[in-house]
Image (cartoon, rainbow, N blue to C red):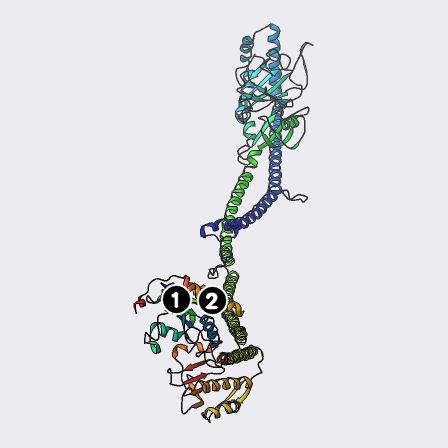
């Protein structure tokens, strides 16, 4: 048999149940995950073909906007501050007092140079002059007042010699680039702004210079002396704080300042990609934002910075002087910018995953709730299919399923009832059929036996007749012929009776209401000859009921019974027959009673059988009582004999149209 | 002994159980012409047959009911059926050695089977033809009364 069809024990259930459960859980989960991913993607990356850029795009543009804002603010502030410083220096350079003092200083220096004095000698010469001392005092006063300038010097633009200073650098050369000592800076005629690093690159200064006197001084028609005011500002103390981004741009927020060649002007916040620290005024940034800014461009860009790290940046060009500008880059690491977003995304994913787990759990639970009763139902159905009608599916689950199960159970119940009913019917019919078959078989044997008997007689006596006639024994011959004739007529009777018996089952008039008394009278009239001959006294109950019967057949019954009674009167000197009705357990029992030879109780059943005779010498064919029985049974009645035995008489009793089904014999 | 008995004029006893008087006449007449002298005792129903064999009712006197050398038994009998008679004979210790020959018109398989189940010694179907019937009777008498050898039985001394 196919395994799938075999009703499985409880354990085996798991597989199909899991199947359904997984299917449901799977579809739920896939739907859920799909929705989550779609929502997630849409919210992070925006909806395609719409203006919604998603969280990612919004965050990016927000950050770039902030960077631009900060860049503009810083640029403005830096420019303003630079302008102030330039103004400071200009104002000082233009003051008449300073100009006067400076001119004297230049004269003295000029003279000293012509005399060929050394720096130390020049310093000694100058310190001896009152105007020099007053100038230095002025410079120191200004430095102390502003507090911005680390030192203020007056430099001879021709020679590069420091003529006056707030520190003790007088007589030394002013070097624009300490790395190249030979290069005395050609100080601009106009004011200039530059960043200078010392030889160790540890300290850097913003240096603002300004020509003190626009009018070139002629000394004996020789060289011009142009004194220049130079102010030093420590970048660490002033530029750097100005470029500080504070907390507004996050941890990775940074501002890079480069000159127009891309060289850095302040220390970088982070070490380079190779881990080393970049040197101010030496390291040149090649990264795109700084390069663009240094070249005079402004804007925003997403690219990689000097560390080769992806950044969002706003770059600005700061025009420091007319022909010189710095590049400023305000930037933020991309990783930091999108960190909250990424965190949110991962949180979102975690939530999604938890949701999926929840959904799976819930759907499994749901599937259980729905699938278990259905599974039980299916198993019950399988068992029913296998032929077990005593199983019932447990009533459980939702209302609809419960209703289904209840209907299913009552269906099984009905099927079982039908089956029982059918089986019962089949049993009854089988029994009936078997009885009929047995009866038919018996009938066939009996008929063949009883028909053969007279034939044998005829044949044999014909043989004897031949012998007797050969011997001339006429008396014996006559006997033989008489026997033959008798056998032939008995065979005729037999055939007539058989025909009659076979008719009983087929020819049956529809029942009519007849007074039983009439039937009795009719039968008695038919037998009046025999009754008179034997001198039988007949007593008929005057109070007989009306019955619903086939009139002709019932007369036949009575005729047979009365005939039977006459035949078995024996030696009774006062033969009597009584016909009446009595009440036996709720139904009318009709009877034909005689005071003849009676019947031994042993034979009470047999006498109704076909061809069964108690006495071989009687004339009957043995069909009469069988016929009676058949007719009574067709009328749903029973027939039996009551007799206490030999010489006690007998009563043949029968009922008609009994409520209960006729008992099958 | 049997042979001796039959031939020596001590007639063999045959019990014929047959309800049909005509058939009984045929059997008796067939056997009367037989070489083996015999006495046929005829009863018409099963009850009488048993009464005769068990010596009761009308047959209490052993003189009137000598023990038969063979019983010819019809099956369909009034009052007590032939098969029942056979069963009683074969269940009786005193009678069970008497050969019982079933002589009937019935060819029913069931009757044959039952008869042998109850230990019938032979089952003969009455032939329709007179010559055959006569021949059968002749053979039957010769076989059972001459050729067949029976054991000694308790009634022999009577």
Report the residue that reaches farthest toward the top.
Answer: A116
| Vertical arrangement, residue B141 with respect to residue A72, above or below | below
When the figure is inspected, residue A200 is found, relative to residue A649, above or below; the finding is above
Q: Nearer the viewer, residue A314 or A613?
A: A613
Left or right, A414 with respect to B158, comes to right
SS for tag 1? Answer: helix
* Mark identifier at residue B138: 2
SS for tag 2?
A: helix
From where the camera sits, is residue A664 visible?
A: no
Binning the other alpha carbons within 10 Å of mark 2 as few (below 14), some (14 to 19) or many (20 upward) gives some
Q: Disc 1 versus disc 2: distance between alpha carbons?
A: 14 Å
Residue sticking out furthest to the left: B157
Q: Which residue is mark 1?
A: B6
Residue A488 position in % (x across, y down): 55, 78
Q: Is residue A313 above or below residue A365?
A: above
Check disc 1: other Cα within 10 Å, few if <14, some if 14-19, many if 20+.
some
Residue B52 % position (x, y)? 36, 74
Residue A42 or residue B82, whichever sits in front:
B82
Q: Give yes or no for contact between labels 1 and 2 (Cβ–Cβ under 8 Å).
A: no
- Callout 1: residue from which chain? B
Q: Earlier in the sequence, mark 1 or mark 2?
A: 1
For residue A567, the mark is none
Q: Quadrant of residue A338?
A: top right
Q: Residue at x 56, y 34 (%)?
A: A335
Q: State which quadrant residue A606 falls in.
A: bottom left
Q: On screen, A529 above or below A421? A: below
Decide if residue A193 is in sight here.
yes
């Amino acid at each position: 048999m196919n395994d799938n069809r075999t009703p499985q024990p409880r354990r085996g259930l798991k597989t199909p149940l899991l199947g359904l459960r997984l299917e449901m859980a799977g579809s739920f989960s896939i739907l859920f995950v799909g929705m989550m991913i779609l929502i997630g993607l849409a919210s992070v990356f925006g909806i395609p073909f719409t203006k919604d850029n998603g969280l990612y795009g919004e965050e990016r543009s927000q950050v770039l906007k902030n960077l631009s804002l900060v860049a503009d603010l810083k640029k403005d502030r830096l420019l303003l501050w630079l302008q102030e410083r330039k103004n400071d220096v200009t104002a000082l350079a233009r003051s008449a007092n300073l100009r006067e003092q400076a001119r004297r200083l230049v004269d003295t220096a000029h003279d000293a140079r012509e005399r060929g004095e050394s720096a130390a000698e020049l310093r000694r010469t100058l310190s001896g002059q009152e105007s020099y001392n007053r100038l230095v005092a002025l410079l120191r006063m200004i430095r102390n007042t502003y507090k911005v300038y680390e030192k203020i010097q007056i430099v001879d633009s021709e020679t590069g010699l420091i003529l006056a200073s707030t520190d003790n650098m007088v007589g030394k050369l002013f070097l624009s680039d300490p790395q190249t000592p030979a290069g005395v800076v050609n100080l601009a005629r106009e004011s200039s702004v530059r960043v200078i690093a010392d030889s160790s690159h540890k300290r850097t200064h913003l240096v603002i210079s300004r020509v003190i006197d626009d009018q070139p001084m002629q000394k004996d028609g020789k060289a011009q002396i142009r004194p220049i005011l130079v102010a030093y500002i420590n970048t660490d103390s002033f530029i750097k704080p100005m470029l500080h981004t504070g907390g507004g741009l996050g941890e990775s927020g940074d501002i890079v300042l480069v000159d127009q060649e891309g060289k850095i002007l302040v220390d970088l916040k982070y070490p380079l990609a190779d881990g080393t620290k970049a040197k101010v005024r030496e390291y040149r940034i090649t990264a795109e934002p700084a390069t663009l800014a240094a070249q005079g461009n402004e804007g925003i860009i997403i690219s990689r910075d000097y560390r080769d790290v992806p950044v969002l940046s706003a770059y600005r060009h700061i025009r420091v002087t007319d022909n010189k500008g710095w590049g400023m880059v305000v930037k933020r690491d991309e990783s930091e910018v999108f960190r909250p977003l990424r965190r949110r995304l991962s949180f979102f994913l975690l939530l999604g995953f938890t949701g999926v787990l929840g959904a799976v759990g819930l759907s499994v639970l749901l599937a259980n709730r729905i699938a278990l009763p259905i599974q039980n139902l299916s198993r019950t159905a399988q068992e029913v299919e296998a032929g077990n009608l005593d199983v019932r599916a447990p009533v459980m689950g939702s209302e609809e399923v419960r209703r289904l199960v209840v209907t299913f159970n009552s269906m099984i119940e009905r099927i079982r009832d039908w089956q029982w009913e059918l089986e019962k019917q089949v049993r009854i019919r089988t029994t009936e059929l078997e009885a009929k078959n047995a009866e038919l078989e018996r009938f066939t044997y009996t008929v063949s036996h009883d028909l053969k008997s007279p034939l044998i007689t005829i044949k044999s006596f014909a043989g004897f007749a031949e012998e007797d006639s050969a011997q001339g024994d006429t008396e014996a011959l006559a006997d033989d012929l008489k026997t033959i004739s008798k056998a032939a007529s008995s065979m005729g009777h037999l055939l007539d009776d058989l025909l009659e018996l076979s008719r009983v089952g087929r020819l049956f008039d529809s029942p009519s209401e007849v007074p039983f008394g009439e039937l009795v009278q009719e039968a008695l009239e038919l037998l009046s000859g025999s009754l008179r001959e034997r001198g039988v006294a007949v007593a008929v109950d005057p109070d007989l009921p009306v019955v619903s019967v086939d009139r002709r057949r019932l007369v036949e019954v009575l005729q047979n019974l009365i005939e039977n009674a006459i035949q078995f009167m024996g030696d009774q000197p006062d033969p009597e027959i009584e016909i009446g009705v009595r009440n036996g357990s709720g139904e009318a029992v009709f009877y034909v009673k005689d005071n003849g030879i009676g019947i031994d109780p042993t034979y009470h059943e047999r006498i109704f059988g076909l061809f069964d005779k108690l006495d071989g010498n009687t004339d009957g064919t043995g069909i009469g009582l069988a016929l009676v029985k058949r007719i009574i049974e067709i009328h749903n009645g029973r027939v039996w004999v009551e007799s206490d035995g030999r010489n006690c008489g007998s009563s043949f009793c029968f009922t008609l149209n009994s409520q209960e089904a006729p008992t099958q014999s | 002994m049997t042979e001796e008995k039959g031939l020596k004029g001590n007639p063999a006893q045959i019990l014929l159980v047959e309800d049909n008087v005509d058939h009984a006449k045929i059997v008796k007449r067939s056997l009367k012409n037989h070489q083996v002298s015999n006495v046929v005792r005829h009863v018409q129903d099963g009850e009488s047959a048993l009464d005769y064999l068990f010596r009761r009712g009308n047959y209490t006197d052993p003189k009137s009911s000598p023990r038969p050398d063979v019983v010819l038994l019809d099956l369909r009998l009034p009052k007590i059926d032939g098969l029942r008679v056979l069963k009683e004979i074969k269940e009786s210790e005193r009678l069970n050695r008497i050969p019982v020959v079933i002589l009937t018109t019935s060819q029913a398989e069931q009757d044959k089977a039952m008869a042998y189940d109850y230990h019938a010694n032979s089952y003969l179907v009455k032939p329709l033809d007179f010559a055959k019937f006569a021949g059968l009777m002749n053979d039957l008498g010769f076989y059972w009364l001459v050729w067949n050898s029976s054991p000694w039985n308790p009634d022999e001394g009577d």
